[in-house]
Amino acid sequence: MSIDKIRGAILGAVIGDALGVPFEFLRRDSFSKNEIKQMKGWGTHNQPPGTWSDDSSMSLILIDIIITGYTPKKLMDSFIKWKNSGLWTPHGELFDIGISTQNALNRYESYVISPTDVGGDDVCNNGNGALMRIYPIAFWLLKSSFEKRLNIVREISSLTHRHIRSIIASMFYIEYLILLLNGKDKFTAFYEVKKIVAPLIPTEEIQVFKNIFNENFIFYPRDQINSGGYVIDTLEAFFWIFLNYGNYQDAVIESVLLGDDTDTTATVVGCAAGIYYGVKSIPHEWIEKIVKLNEIEELSKKFAIFLNEN
């Protein structure tokens, strides 16, 4: 596995996250492109420039657990350390956590229960908290069977989000990243991933994913693309942005400009753009501003070694 692809994914995701953090929950187009380009700090969460959020914390924890030997319990225990003790946070303490994620972690701490049984399985528990952290699986299980990837995605998603909608959304993202890693162009990959994932969608969920299967989806007007914390909003915004913008910088800036859940939209777009366009496509001045850059780079190297030895 190329270290460039791994660094592209990790730095691409973390930088997208950090670009979006100051603008989270703000209305679409209520801020300018120039503000985003500057890697602005403070804003919504009052954090310094280069600060990333729960999206990156949970992804980096997942990478660390994959390297050291994944089990659902080990991953969940690390998520608890993140929540309570600031594990893999930019400044040593938690400042952002989704409601469904927090509820699942609280249930895990309060009851003797399997970690894969604590995630919410109601239709209301379909925030993007699993999708936002899931990308390391694409690297880890790149050469594994589709069935194994589905089982692991289901398992890791279910730690916080057990509803089938969240699991399918995560599979869409993982299988799409795998197609990119295998050299497919982004449009061909979009066509193919729909054929791959379609058989997983229960009849009652088909309508939920209808926009992605619409042959004119890529041509939807911008005001038809939602960017809230709902997992389908994030998945649709990801595909629409990634397919419509032709370089890393434009893709992540446009992700943030959509407003609302800016950090997560820019995280999932930034990861794919970092893979597709490479680390060299990411502005160096953005990379330099990332908090704990050395630690992130070191984890990327360890992940590359692990993947190439296993």
Image: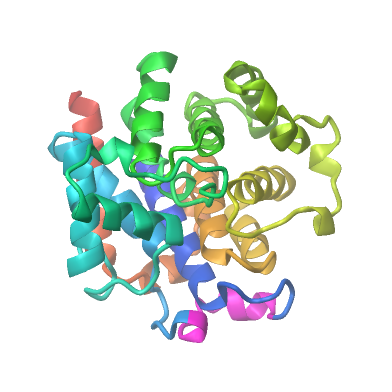
Residue drawn at 40 percent across, 39 percent down: 157
Would you place residue 178 above or below residue 287 in this image? Answer: above
Q: Is residue 114 left or right of residue 198?
A: left
Residue drawn at 41 percent across, 57 percent down: 55
Where in the figure is residue 309, as x and y percent of width and height?
18, 26
Where in the figure is residue 15, as x and y percent of width and height?
45, 62
Nearer-the-camera pick, 115 or 214: 115
Residue drawn at 17 percent across, 44 percent down: 112
Residue 30, quarter of picture: bottom right
Would you place residue 79 above or below residue 184 in this image? Answer: below
Nearer-the-camera pick, 125 or 171: 125
Q: Is residue 300 visible?
A: no
Is residue 249 a member of the stretch shown in magenta? no
Nearer-the-camera pick, 296 or 21: 21
Where in the figure is residue 233, as x and y percent of width and height?
66, 50
| Viewport quadrant of the N terminus | top left
Magenta region: which residues?
31-44
Q: Is residue 268 left or right of residue 222?
A: left
| Viewport quadrant of the C terminus | top left
